[in-house]
Structures are given as structure tokens and as C-alpha cells.
Amino acid sequence: MAQFFWRGRRHVPSDKTAPTIPTNLAGIPTTTTVALTWDASTDNVAVTGYNIYRDGALVGSSGTTSYTDTGLTASTTYAYAVSAFDAAGNESAKSTAINVTTSSGGSPPAAPGAGTAEPLPY
Amino acid sequence: MLLRTLLFIIMSVVAASAQTRQIYVTWAASASVGTADFTGYKVYRCNPSPCTPTVQIGTSTTNTYFDTGLANSTSYVYTWSAYGPGGETPSGQTSTATTYGAPTTRNVTCSGDISSAVQTAANASADGDIVNIGAGSCTMSGLLIQDKAITIQGQGQGVTNITGNIGTWVVNTSNAPTFRITGFSLTDTGTPSSSLVLFGDQDASWRGPFRIDHVDFNYPNAGPDGIIQIYGPLFGLIDHCNFTQSFEAMILTAPHLNTEGGSVTDLKGAFVATLPYQPGAGNYLYIEDSTFTANSASGAAAYDTGYSGGRLVFRHNTTSNSGLFAHWTSANSINSMWWEVYNNTFSFSNASPVEWMRMEGGGSGIIYNNTTSGFVPNSMQLGDGRLESNSGAPLLLCDGTHNWDGNAGDASATGWPCLMQTGRDAGKTVAQIQAGNRQANFPLYMWNNGPQAKCSNPAAAGAACDNTAGVTPNEAAWFKSTPHTVSGGGYGQGDVDYCVNTSQPSGCGTHTLTYTPYTYPHPLNH
């Protein structure tokens, strides 16, 4: 058993190959969120996860081929890109960026008018 | 004995700490109400004045807010905003109110005739004070005029027992639209003219709120036409009361002491008619958690409006042999009755069943989740007042010749839709109506009403609600349950007077329903 383990360790080459670039990135917006999906990458060993970039900055990672970005502002356009990485820390190039515009929140409501306050005896 | 003493001390402490103050705040609604831009209002408060209210204390879906648990003799400044998905818009308005001081309690012993003692105590009271009637049995026979913002309380239903005719207990709501009457039982075997009259000698502003709660009104033999009579545009809350009588109406309302005006320049109900219907409004007359029992063969009305309407929310009540009735628009009055009736149980078991609701020539509303059994089948009865004319009447006589009448192209319903008939909104002045600025469409909505207990209470045992409590028009041609089209088109084209559904619809005909019920229990019901 110890011999088998030794031989295995000895014969694994160090992984210097990055996963392929994720494709078909798409985003579905609400007023404050964008739900992203993409097609899986492949790797010579295994894809561990994906990094998600909003306007060039890393905002999170996902172990699956979907991610929901939250806390956004209505009626705003964001550029998203995704990369894949493996266990050895090899990261692919970023996918082609897509622009997603969050939904309009509508207009602020009209202002209420004047009012009164009165004390109650009970 | 020691235990009783300790309990008494504990209860006294609890009662003292519960004596907090309340402020009622209301404001002009946002024009965005009913649109996707509007979610609700935010209310902000600070104290003492002067200060800038920046701390949010709550939200409201209506343009009213009851702020509770406040300190005595403290000035509070309020502001309010409208908010929705697109943001928040401040009103830029503030309003300040100062709570009443610590109340002075004047005790009246419940023994013998207490009429003059209660009157003396009420006269000596300042706004915010309490007249406290003790436990026991006593009588009340004289006139009681209450014209201050005070609380008159007994020690509880069946604990403070008042007998005799108190038909002359008058609350002058012109001076005191806010008051509370609570905590006793009234029993009279005679036929008095009334029991409690709330009388405002004004009909040009919407005033309140009052609260009448935890009172038993027992008139087992006959009773007055209107145990509680409410005159004038007044709003408030009646809760946890039990009404027993056998004659006419238990609660009677009219927007003015004189239900019928003298001429077109003295038209009763005209002010209330200028207020458009607001489903789910907070400043209507709320009747909840009460019971209504009638003993006569054909029952009695739990609620009856006078000739010129009102704004009623009747919910979570139980009635026996008693229904709801509205009278009509007539020559010199305008009925602008709004009904919200939900989660009630109406049952009829006496000899001569009647309709469980009548809307005779006026009003609209939302009626749902009611258990209604033993009444005349399909007995939400609609009638119109088009024949209730008299010579020289400034309004009514719906014949297609007046500019407030509807079309003249339907031979079976010439003039439809008539002034203030079921399915018409309020919100117009008499001058507007007479100038031909006709009322908009607001159909009567009904859903999920039937004889099963599950209709009013989803948790009840038994079969599902079959939604068989529907509408029976008195004059069928005059009430349209499908979009009405007439040759030549015109006013009313595509309108519907009422819709019966199995669940809350998004609309009826061309009308869209935006409705969120007001919070239950009512904020004052605590």
C-alpha cells in the first residue's frame, strides 16, 4: 500500500494547464440582481470553480456554472466576465464580457400632501 | 386575602403602566397610489418640538397612522414620505401634536341613578381625563351630554351593569370627535328612541377617531331604531361590543342629523360624496370583533345607513338574524356608501328570512370571505333609487334626460347608469355632477361568500366554501354583470356594475382593483 502510494505521487506531473475559457455567458437582471449562467470549461485535470468579475473587479466565485450578483442599482449597466480555475490555481483568461442592465425601478412616487396630527384622549 | 391583595397591587401597577398616549396622524394621499410606483408610506417622528423628524417609526399602506405608547404632555413632530421600487419621495410637510397630560380620574359609584353624577364628572373633566364608573348595578335615566375628549369607562361587561333607558346619552362630536366609551353592560326591556347618539353638527369635514368598545347593549324585547346613532362624517372603531335587540337597526349612520336636505343647495351627503372610495382606508368606521343578535321573526339590521351613506368596514363579526342595509339616494340627498365586509359569519334561523345585505340605490364595495347561512338565497340585493323621485327633485329620476344620467340607447335601462347606483364611484361635488361631470365606474366586488364555515375562516372544519352567496338585482335590467354595450356607445360603454368571483380578481369589466385590507385588528383595538 505504501509502495503504491509512493509510486502514484511520484508519477503525477505538476499541472500547469489552465482550464478552457467559459463560453456563452448570459445574465438575467432584476432591479437589484443579475443572475449569470455560462457553459462549463474543461481542464486537463478538473475545473474547480469560476471567478466572476463585474466591471473588471472580482465580485465572487462559484463552484457551478451559475452565480447571482446582488445589491445592484436599478437602471444601471454592468459588464460581467467569468474565468475558470483548477485545483492547481491555474486560471483561464476571462470570457468575453457582456453588458447587463438592471431593470427600471419605475419612478419615485408622487409626494404625499399636507397632514394633521391630533392627540387621542385614550 | 393576602394573595388577593397582592394580585390587586400587581393589576394596579399593570393598569398604570398601560396608561400611555396615542396620536393620530393623517395626510393627503400621494397621486401615485394604485400605480406600480407606490408601495406605501414611511412615517418619521421626533420629540419634543421643535425638532426635525429623521427617525422612521413605521410604515403604512394608507394615508393614516396611529402612533401608540407615547408619553403624557409631550410634543411630537411627524413627517411622512411615499416610497416604491423607484425610490422614496418626502412630503416636505410636518405636523405637530402634544399628547394630553396624565389623566385625572373621577370616580362615580354605580348605585342608584348615576345620570347626574356622570354629567358632573364629565363637566369637570379636561380633555384626556377619565370618568370611571364603578362595579355594580345602577340606573341611568337622565340626559347626558358629553362634549369633551374624554374616556367614560366602567369596570367591564357584566361587571358594571346599567339598566334603564339611556336614550339620551349624546356625544357632541363637533366639540369632541375623539372620545372613548368602554366597559359596561346596558340593559333595557323597553323601547327607547335610542341609546347612544354621536352627533356632529357639521357635515363638511371628516373627523375622529372615536372608540366604543367592550360594551353590551341589551334590548331583548324591542329596542331603539339605532342603539348607536352616528350623524355626521365621523370615523372610528366599534369593537368587542354585543348588541341584542329586535327592532330596526342596531347601528345607524347618516352623514347629517337631517337625512333629507331641503333643496339642491341643502343637499345632505354632499360632502361625503366628494370623497372617492378608498379600498382599505384607515379612517373609515370600523366595526369588528362584535356580535349582533335579533330576536324578532324577520330579524333586524346590524347596520343601517341613513339616506346619504357613509364609509363602513364590517369585519370579523358574528350576527344572528341580522344583516346589513343601505338606503337610497333620493331627492335631496346623495348616497355614497362604501362597504368593506369580510370574514364575518351571518346566520338566520328565525321564522322569516330576509336578505343578508341590501344596497338600495347607492354605494359600492368589496364583500368577501363571509359565511352567510339561512338567509334568502343569493341575497345580496341590489336596488336602485331611480323611481324614488318627488316633484322638483334636483337629483334622481333616472330617465336619460339629465346630464348626469347615462346612455339613452338601451330601451330596457334608459338612463343607465343612474346617479349613485351600485357600481358608481364617489368623489364628485354636486356642482360637478349637475354640470355633467359623471361618476366614474367602481363595481361592487364579491368573492368567496357562502354558507360554509370555511368561507369566513379557512381553519374551520367542514366543506370548502362554495361561493354561492351572490347578487340578486331588484330590477335586473339596471345592473350589469357583464360589460354593457349600447347602440351609439357613450357613457358606461364596457362598464360592469358588479362581479362575483371565487377569489380576489384583478379587476371587473374595465375597472382595475387595487386592494389591500387595512391591518387587523385595528390599531386602536388593543
Image: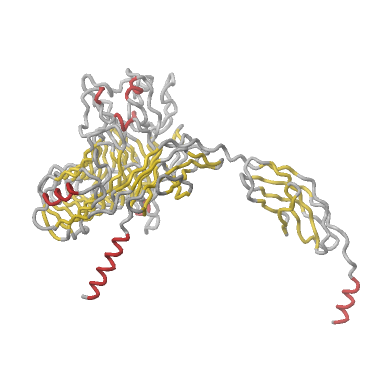
Answer above or below: position of B266 versus B15: above
User: What x and y, as percent, mark residue B162?
Assistant: 14, 54
Q: Dividing the image into 4 quarters, which one contains the C terminus of chain B?
A: bottom left
Q: Decide if residue B75 is on the left or right side of residue B306.
A: right
Please tell me whether residue A121 is drawn above or below residue B425 in the rendered image. Answer: below
Relative to the observer, which residue lies in front, B391 or B62? B62
Give the percent coordinates (x, y) of residue B288: 31, 50
User: Measured from the top left, where is residue B340 in percent x and y?
Assistant: 35, 42
For the question of whether residue B356 can be seen, the reply is yes
* Count of numbered marks: 0
Q: Nearer the viewer, residue B35 or B3?
A: B3
- Left or right: B226 in relation to B207: left
Q: In front here: A19 or A81?
A: A81
Residue A20: x %, y % from top left: 83, 54
Front residue of this view, candidates B455 and B100: B100
Residue positioned 73% across, 42% down in the render? A99
